[in-house]
Amino acid sequence: MNLLPGHPGSCWLSTAPRTTYPPVEGSLHAETIIVGGGIVGLTTALRLCEAGASVIVVEALRIGGQVTGRSTAKITTQHALIYRHLIETRGRELAQSYADANRSGAARIKEWIRQYDIGCDLESRPAYAYTSSPARRADIAAEAEAARELGLEAEAIDKAPLPFETAGALLFPDQAQFNPASYLAGLARAVVERGGQVFENSRAVLIDEASRWRVVTDGGHTLHAEHVVIATNMTVKSPVGMANRTQPRSHVAMAFRTDGPDMVDGMFIGIDDPTRSLRMGRDAKGPLLVALGPKFNTGQDGNVAARFQELEQWVRQRFPVRDVVWRWCNEDYDTADRVAFAGTPDPEKAAGFHIATGFNAWGISNGTAAGMMIADLVSAKSNPWVTLYDPARPYPKDFHKNADSQSILDDVEDIAPGQGGVLVQGDEKVAVWRDDAGRLHAVSATCTHKGCTVTWNNADRTWDCPCHGSIFAADGSVIHGPARKPLASVSL
Ligand code: FES
C-alpha cells in the first residue's frame, strides 16, 4: 500500500495553464523540427521564430509536464559550488564561458517573461548555498572569490537566513524563481504567435536522415526538416552516444502547505551530504514550502518511498509546515565535468543534427543558454559557448554506471500492494506490480532502449531503468526516454 502523503505530481503543473495543442497529422515540413517541448526545445523554437525561421515543436506528452515542470525552477547562476571547480578543472576561460552562458540564460528568461507577458510567478530572490560544517567555510569563501573573478556578484556570509544552525553560506543576490510549467506554456504560446507550430501527444519514434531530416511520430505521421533538435532531456538518438557520457539521477521533491509569511526568504541549496534544497512556491490554494531531497541514481534505489518519508521528517523537524500537498520525483543527467552536452555532435557526418543533455540539475539557466546556442547554430551564427558545451568532447569512460543488477523475486506472493518486482517466466523477465485492490499487473521487464531490466519505483509507481534513465508508467507506456517504445505486454 502506498501510504505517502500528498498528491502525486509537481505543484507547478497544478496551476499552469493547460495546453491543448493537437497531435501531428499528415506530412509536414519546416526548416527546423524540435523534438521535446521543455525549456531547451521551446527556447530554441522561440529564438528561431523571432528570427523568422519556420519551426515545428513535437512533444511526446504535454508542454511543461516533463523534466522542466518537475524542476525546482531556480533562475540563478549559483549552482551550488561550481566556479572554483571549473577554473581548476577546465580553466579560467571555460569557467568564464559557463558564467556568461548562465547569466545570459537567466537574463533571457526574465526578458521573455516581460516581453511576452508570461504569468509564471516570477519573483526576485537571493540564492544561498549553505553548509552546516565549519570545515567547509573555506570552500564557500573560495567559491565567492572565484565567482567574483568571473564577474558575478557573490559574498561569503557567516550563516544562512534559515531557522536552523548553519556554519556559513554563499550569497548571490538578485536571482529569481518562477513556475516553470507556466513559463513553458507562455513560451509555447509565443512560438505559435510568431508563426511556429506546436504539437502535443506526438512521440518521435523514428529519427533518420534521407535527403533531409525525417521524424516519424507514434501516430505514423512524418515531419521533414533541414535541422532537427533533440531536446528530450536524454537524447533519443545521436551520432555520438550520450548514454555513456551521462549518469541518470533523480531527486524526490515535496511541497508543504504553510501559513503566514514565507518560511524561507530565498532559494537554498545545502552543499553537505545529504544535499537538500528549499524555496517557497505556490499553488491555487496558497503558499508552499518546496523541499528537495538528495539525489540517487535513477532506477537504482529499491525504496524511493523511504526517501520521501525521510525528506518529510527532515522538513518537519525544522519548519512548522502543515500538510504535504504535492510530491514528485524529478530527473536529470549528470556529466563528469558538471557541464551539459549541447550543440552539433558531428557537423560533418550529421550536419543539421543538434542535441542537449546532462544539465546536472541546473537546467533552467543552462537549458536556456543551450537553446539560445542551438538556435544560433541552426542559423549559422557564431556562438561563444560552443566549446563549453561541446557534445563530442572527451569524457571518462568509467563515469557511467549501468548497474543492471535487478534482484529476482521467487513468487508473486512476495509482492505487497503498491509494490512491484521482477520475476522470471520461462526465459523472460517480467515486471509485476500489485495494485491497492490486490490485483497483479505485468509487462516485460526488458527496457526497450538497450535491454536492461527495469526496477519498480514504489513512490511514483513507475518502472525505472537503471541504465540510462528511461521511465515507464505502470502500464509500460513511456514517460521519459531515451526509450521510445513501451514495455511489451505480458500475460502472467
Ligand atoms: Fe537504456 Fe533502459 S534506458 S537500457
Image: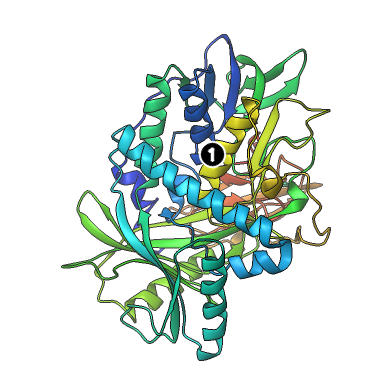
At label 1, counting other C-alpha atoms closer than 10 Å, the crowd grade (few under 14, some 14-19, many 20 or more) is many
Q: Residue at x 56, y 59 (%)?
A: 250
- For the N terminus, which image quadrant? bottom left
Q: Is residue 368 left or right of residue 17?
A: right
User: Residue 299, relative to residue 80: is it above or below?
Assistant: above
- For the C terminus, which image quadrant? top right
Q: Residue at x 48, y 52 (%)?
A: 435
Q: Position of residue 408 (x, y in %)?
A: 72, 61
Q: Is residue 53 visible?
A: yes
Between residue 64 and residue 201, name the one nearer to us.
64
Q: Residue at x 36, y 33 (%)?
A: 186
Labels in figure, total: 1
Q: Position of residue 292 (x, y in %)?
A: 44, 65
Between residue 89 and residue 57, name the one nearer to us.
89
Between residue 209 and residue 138, name the one nearer to us.
138
Scheme of image coloration: rainbow
User: Residue 398, relative to residue 161: is it above or below?
Assistant: above
Q: Is residue 363 visible?
A: no
Work out which residue is located at the far bottom of the displayed protein and give it: 134
Q: Which residue is mark 1?
A: 40
Q: Position of residue 284 (x, y in %)?
A: 22, 48
Q: Quadrant of residue 266?
A: bottom left
Look at the numbered disc 1 and say if its residue's Cβ is closer than 8 Å to ligand 1: no
Q: Secondary structure at mark 1?
A: helix
Q: Which residue type does callout 1 highlight?
A: Val
Q: Residue at x 68, y 49 (%)?
A: 388
Q: Quadrant of residue 309?
A: bottom left
Q: Position of residue 77 (x, y in %)?
A: 49, 58
User: Residue 341, relative to residue 5: is it above or below?
Assistant: above
Q: Quadrant of residue 165?
A: bottom left
